[in-house]
Image (spheres, rainbow, N blue to C red):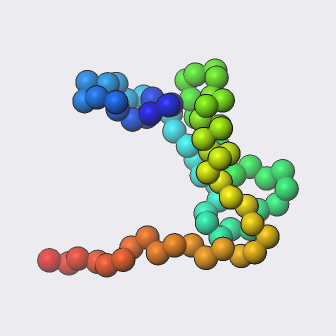
């Protein structure tokens, strides 16, 4: 919601021009200086968004296994 892509209330406007483009997935190799994501925003100051992202991205020297995202497929 910091960028305007979500709603605080059902009356809140959604800005369809904002969001994040993730360039890496869990387990992908990362090289120094490589961009991990792009922030699209209509606000000049995205420091709060950047801080949240920096605090939640972990880079490890060891290979990390991606978590299972689909646990079961329901067909009926």
Task: Judge by depth and name the residue closer to the eye, 31 or 8.
Answer: 8
- In-image side of 76 versus 37 (left or right): left
Q: State which quarter of the image contains the N terminus.
A: top left
The image shows residue 33 at horizontal and vertical percentages of: 84, 50
Q: Position of residue 7 (x, y in %)?
A: 35, 32
The answer to whether residue 52 is left or right of residue 59 is left
Residue 17: in sight, yes or no? no
Task: Give the residue at x 51% y 31%.
Answer: 3
Quarter of the picture containing the C terminus is: bottom left
Q: Is residue 76 above or below residue 33?
A: below
Q: What residue is shown at x 65% (from left), y 54% (from top)?
A: 57
Number of disc labels? 0
Is residue 35 visible in the rendered structure shown here? yes
Percent position (x, y) of residue 23? 64, 54
Q: Position of residue 55 (x, y in %)?
A: 65, 47
Which residue is found at the position 65% from the left and 38% from the top?
A: 51
State whether residue 33 is above or below residue 61: above
- Give the residue displayed 75% in from the left and 66% down from the top: 60
Quick check: 48 above or below 43? below
Residue positioned most to the left = 76
Please indicate whether residue 65 sits to the left or right of residue 29 in the image: left
Q: Residue furthest front?
A: 55
Q: Is residue 62 above or below residue 38?
A: below
Quadrant hosting residue 26? bottom right
- In the picture provided, is 72 more to the left or to the right than 62? left
- Considering every residue shown, the one lying at the far top of the view is 44
């Amino acid at each position: 919601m910091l960028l305007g892509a979500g709603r605080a209330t059902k009356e809140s406007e959604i800005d369809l021009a904002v969001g994040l483009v993730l360039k890496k997935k869990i387990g992908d190799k990362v090289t120094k200086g490589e961009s991990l994501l792009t922030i699209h925003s209509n606000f000049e100051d995205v420091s709060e968004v950047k801080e949240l992202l920096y605090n939640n991205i972990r880079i490890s020297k060891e290979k990390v296994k991606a978590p299972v995202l689909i646990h079961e497929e329901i067909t009926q």
